[in-house]
Image (cartoon, rainbow, N blue to C red):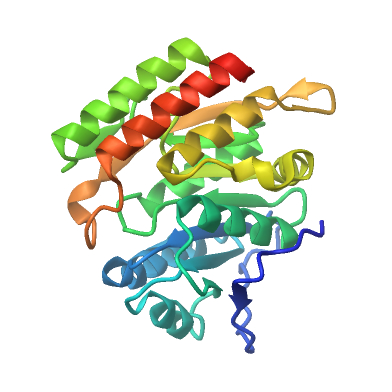
Amino acid sequence: MSHPLDESVGLLDQPRPQFEASSHEVKPTVRLALPAYNEAESLEMLLESLHRTLAAAEIPHEIVVVDDGSSDETAQIASAASFRLPVRLVRHEKNQGLAAALRTGFIDAVEHSAPEDIIITMDSDNTHPAGLMPRMIQMIGEGHDVVIASRFQSGARVIGVPFDRVLLSIAARILFKVAFPIRGVRDYTCGYRAYRAGMLAAAINHYGDRFVSEKGFSCMVDVLLKLRRLRIDGGPIVMGEAPMILRYDLKGGVSKMRVLRTIGQTLSLILRRRVGGA
């Protein structure tokens, strides 16, 4: 699928070593799209963990780091890692925000994927457990189109998250579950998700640049609401969740979320979608 990237995006054009699964079984390739802004403190550890987890499961993979105009060494760390890990760097010359970085990651991953491949997004601050990926990938293979790493399924745990963030997550869950119920979904705001590449390509083709149009952290909710409306081959998109152990105590650097701003963006999104239709 062809989709022009923003002119401010530059690809690091240099030879890359080839990384392949040792198994003779043909498996879908997993492409991870990691929006990253000033994540130098945690990025290298995360990249190692992601590669180690997927290599142990003999799953072919590529990790795409979308550096959103970082002022620290995020880009340099990703570039250096690309010589020993299946990592590729995509750069925004200027900081454009989470939505723009996510949009770039989606488009880039879809352009490099076959329909049967799997695209995973997650935070770059080392709070999302790499070990959950095989379960999420398995659920895609079982028939899901989207799998969300959930804080609200049985077996999930949240460690080290500030109290105001916990309250915000619970309130968002209740509001969206009442206003926009999606079968199989409780956690509307978590960005750790696995998508079937063919489904994601169809969604981007349908919505174009509007697919990721909300600013800030509310863009994650908006993506789900748009997928909720979409029909592929006459049927709905099947979503499910895998319980996650969120390790906020392992977070590197400071949080990029502004709680009051996020609350305002979330309430605005609910109002606009209820009035305009979701």
**Residue 91 appearing in the image:** yes
| Residue that appears at 51% across and 86% down | 83
| Residue that appears at 48% across and 19% down | 271
Q: How many marks?
A: 0
In the image, is 83 to the left or to the right of 195?
Answer: left
Q: Is residue 151 above or below residue 217?
A: above
In the image, is 174 to the left or to the right of 85?
Answer: left
Quadrant hosting residue 40: bottom left
Q: Is residue 231 above or below residue 215?
A: above
Estimate the x, y position of residue 248 in percent, counting from the top left.
22, 48
Q: Quadrant of the N terminus?
A: bottom right
**Residue pushed farthest top?**
178
**Residue pushed farthest bottom?**
15
| Residue that appears at 35% across and 68% down | 43
Estimate the x, y position of residue 216 in percent, counting from the top left.
43, 45
Front in this rendered view, residue 131 or 99: 99
Estimate the x, y position of residue 78 in percent, counting from the top left.
44, 77
Q: Is residue 50 above or below residue 234?
A: below
In the image, is 229 to the left or to the right of 50?
Answer: right
Quadrant hosting residue 81: bottom left
**Residue pushed farthest right?**
233
Front in this rendered view, residue 79 or 114: 79
**Residue 29 appearing in the image:** no
In the image, is 39 to the left or to the right of 164?
Answer: right
Q: Quadrant of the C terminus?
A: top right
Estimate the x, y position of residue 72 in percent, counting from the top left.
32, 76
| Residue that appears at 22% across and 58% down | 254
